[in-house]
Image (cartoon, rainbow, N blue to C red):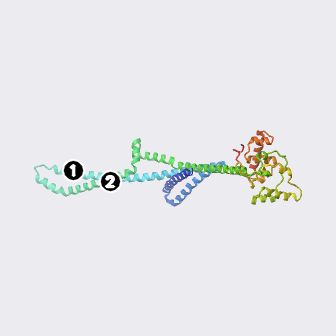
Amino acid sequence: MMIFITILAFTALLIAGNAAYFSILGLAAMFSASYWPVVFMGASLELGKLVAASYVYRAWDDVSRAMKGYLVSAILVLMAITSLGIFGFLSQGYGDSLKQLNEIELLVEQKQIELTIVREDIERIHTEIGNVPNTYVTKRIELQRERRPELEVLAERESRLIEVLTQLNKRILEAKSHVGPILYVADMFNIDKDEAVKYFIFAIIIVFDPLAVILTLATNGALAQKQNESKHKKSEREQNEVQQSSTSEPTTSDPSTKTVNEQIAPVSQKRAPDIPTQVRQMAKQQAPSIQQMDAALAQAQGKSGSLQINNQTKEQPNLTSIQRNDKDIVVLGGAKVHKAVIEDMELSDQEVIMGLVQGVSVGALASRLGLNESAFKSRANHLVDRLKSSGYQINTDHLFV
């Protein structure tokens, strides 16, 4: 997947770079008096277009309608400017080639006219000599002797013009090779070569810069999909680790190793005691064991006699005191939830949340709480919404087993 994303990004940058190059040169040719300022302006606008397209794609649901409207309009206008710059650049290139061809053809026409005049002069002299009667041999010889220097000059000039025309025809062939495809297209559709060039350039610019922008958006989409897949795999891996760590606890007489059926046994609906600051700090800093946290809680509350850990809690432990696994974090729907937040809930609510954390089936949890499955799900969704309102990003798609 990553190789394809790399190829996609490289292709998008290559096409966008070529489009920017042609467009910037075309714009600079239009405003040649300010060549370098136009180059810098065009480069910054091309970069801004790609960044704006990427931002709009990624933050489409997060920005206001006015901002989305402006950015989309700006991107479309910049695409039109790029296309006009490309049209100017390609038109200039065709014009240079065509200008060279036209100049050579004009020169050939001039030399051809000169050659025609020289040949007419030669023919005139020969006609003049031929008009002398054969009986006037002496006169004809004198006329030939008189016209010979002029004939020699004209013959030399004719030879020189023929040589020049030969070289010019070779240059015409070379010039036509640069615009030959256009000429062939014009002949094929029986249209003027200038019209053929215009349509051909239009076909190029229609797919040039728009393709670069579309491939840029496609690259952003592929990267976003890759990130979502990575997050999903990480969430599944964390959930598997939590489940493995919870099922690998040794079987001892400690109440923290009781079965899942014992963990979700119904308890009274009284409010769970507030956790002292000392216990919270200990849980965050050194991840103490269950015994250390219970001892600290007893020490903080037992000295004043205000709140004791009674035997009933030890005889009927709930999930918050059973599945600590020496950590103060549990994973619920891919989100890491602090146990301290769960322990501030009603004890029955703690059972609901911890049952979902451990992957206990909805039927088992509902029967232990004396609820039907529909009522249990409603209660669980309400508790999850409370946790979401506290800032936890919980994925509820695979929450119920």
Mark 2 and mark 1: span between their CA atoms? 25 Å
Give the amino acid at mark 1. Answer: Glu
Give the residue drawn at x 59%, y 54%. 51
User: Is disc 2 surrounded by few (<14), some (14 to 19) or many (20+) residues within 10 Å?
Assistant: some
Q: Position of residue 280 (x, y in %)?
A: 79, 57
Give the residue drawn at x 18%, y 56%. 148
Residue nearest the viewer, comparing 28 with 350: 350
Could you tell me if residue 70 is visible in this image?
Answer: no
Query: Label 2's element?
Result: helix
Q: Position of residue 274 (x, y in %)?
A: 83, 54
Q: Quadrant of the C terminus?
A: top right
Query: Label 1's element?
Result: helix
Residue to which mark 1 is pinned: 123
Residue nearest the viewer, comparing 398 with 206: 398
- As drawn, which residue projects farthest toward the left? 135
Residue to which mark 2 is pinned: 168
Q: Position of residue 335 (x, y in %)?
A: 71, 51
Foreground tag (2 vs 1)? 2
Q: Position of residue 34 (x, y in %)?
A: 51, 60
Could you tell me if residue 50 is visible in this image?
Answer: yes
Vertically, is 304 above or below 4?
below
- As drawn, which residue projects farthest toward the right? 305
Give the amino acid at mark 2. Answer: Leu
